[in-house]
Image: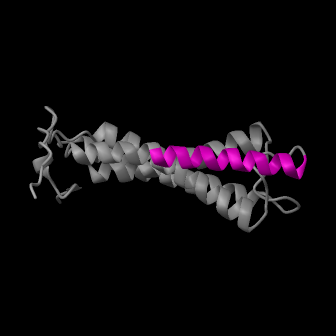
Amino acid sequence: MATTSTPRRSPPPDYGTVRPRRSAWAGVLIGVGIAAFVDETVFHQLLHWHHFYDKSTPGVGLVSDGLFHAFGWFAVVIGLVLVADLRRRAALTGRGLTGGILLGAGFFQLYDGTIQHKLLKLHQIRYHVDLVPYDWTWNVLAVVFLIVGTVLVRRSRNGETHATDTVAGRESG
């Protein structure tokens, strides 16, 4: 019985050229999705503290939670598709990806804590309690994620130009 082999594709012309910016953007999508998933799972489903939209009936709140969950899921999937493409091209930088994940999670948290909670008043973290410790914790963590993510992304952009500078997709040093 003869076996047929599929022809090997030649690597893309930019194979081995590390793409820190694209790595970071993939991470941002994954970070937004992870933060949305944690928010939805912990605060909406497990603790029942709020829905994405609390200004209507519980049914509307559940539908808004479902749409919010789908948004987070799609962000992660698109981010992972970008990661797969970067790995295929030997262009992924782990530091850029990690920094992007932290930037995405931090952006999501800061947006959620300021725009959704305070400006639009779609929901609060909790109801019938003093919100100050919750708001401060939520927003300070967001700022910490943003700072650490920014540092990692900037470090990934300095000096990395070729995949030989990385070992198994991770930066050396």
For image coordinates 86% across by 50% down, the residue present is: 59
- Foreground of the two, 117 or 50: 50
Query: Which of the 4 quarters of the picture holds residue 117?
Result: top right
Q: Quadrant of the C terminus?
A: bottom left
- Residue 49, position in %: x, y? 79, 61
- Residue 11, position in %: x, y? 13, 39
> What number of labels is visible?
0
- Asked whether residue 154 is in view, the answer is no
What is the span of residues highlighted in magenta in the rendered image? 57-77
- Asked whether residue 76 is in view, the answer is yes
- Residue 42, position in %: x, y? 67, 64
Q: Is residue 7 magenta?
A: no
Q: Quadrant of the N terminus?
A: bottom left
Query: Which of the 4 quarters of the picture holds residue 118?
Result: top right
| Secondary structure character of the magenta stretch overall | helix
- Residue 20, position in %: x, y? 28, 41
Q: Is residue 160 left or right of residue 95?
A: left
For image coordinates 35% across by 49% down, the residue present is: 97
Residue reaching furthest to the top: 13
Q: Is residue 58 magenta?
A: yes
- Foreground of the two, 160 or 25: 25
